[in-house]
Image: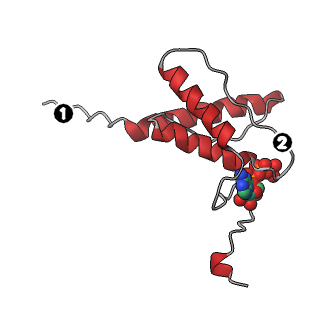
Amino acid sequence: MDLANNPYTPGAGKPPPALVGRDEQIQEGRVVIARTERGRAADAPILYGLRGVGKTVLLKALQAQASDAGWLTIEIEGKQEGAEQTLTRQRLARGLVASARSVTPRAKSSPKRG
Ligand SMILES: Nc1ncnc2c1ncn2[C@@H]1O[C@H](COP(=O)(O)OP(=O)(O)OP(=O)(O)O)[C@@H](O)[C@H]1O
Ligand SMILES: [Mg+2]
């Protein structure tokens, strides 16, 4: 088998050589970005489906789309139940701060007096 040219890319979240059959979702992503940038309401996409159907890969494609449009994006995993909810919020907050820092130049420390 020609391993160098084998298009099969097994592995969680590993992007395939061609994102087959996702044109509709990619187009929906474009609409969400365009509407939001115009200050219009847009439904946040929620991806669900059977194990291994391609949720993570599609999510990454949507993330790249948003990043290319100049949006800050962050990647977190979390659960809604009990104490996990607090942890998820903390991860979200930390991710947002880190992402914002990556595009905002740090304030210079004020010169020492005296
Ligand atoms: N649109 C696509 N066309 C071709 N291959 C794809 C596509 N989407 C995903 N794959 C391939 O399918 C495999 C599983 O993709 P992915 O990890 O995104 O699935 P998942 O739904 O997130 O799985 P899980 O439910 O385990 O989290 C990967 O090897 C990936 O390269
Ligand atoms: Mg996944």
> For numbered disc 2, what is the local secondary structure?
loop
The furthest residue to the right = 50
Say whether residue 12 is visible. no
Q: Are marks 1 and 2 in contact (CB under 8 Å)?
A: no
Could you tell me which quadrant the N terminus lies in? bottom right
Where 64 sits versus 46, above or below? below
Residue located beneath label 1 in the image: 111
Dot placed on the residue nearer the N-terminal end, 1 or 2: 2
* Residue in the foreground of this view, choosing between 102 and 6: 6
Residue 79 lies in quadrant: top right
Distance Cα–Cα, label 1 vs label 2 = 55 Å
Q: Amino acid at mark 2?
A: Gly
Could you tell me which quadrant the C terminus lies in? top left
Residue located beneath label 2 in the image: 49
Looking at the picture, how far across and down is residue 90, in whole percent?
64, 32
Q: Amino acid at mark 1?
A: Pro
Q: Residues within 10 Å of mark 1 (few under 14, many from 20)?
A: few
Say whether residue 17 is visible. yes
Residue appearing at x 53%, y 33% in the figure: 96
Looking at the picture, how far across and down is residue 99, in whole percent?
48, 38
Horizontally, residue 79 falls left or right of residue 17, namely right
Residue 3 lies in quadrant: bottom right
| Residue 47: mark in rendering | none
Where 86 sits versus 40, above or below? below
* Pointer 2 residue Cβ closer than 8 Å to ligand 1: yes
Residue 9 lies in quadrant: bottom right
> For numbered disc 1, what is the local secondary structure?
loop
Residue appearing at x 75%, y 29% in the figure: 85
Residue appearing at x 56%, y 37% in the figure: 95
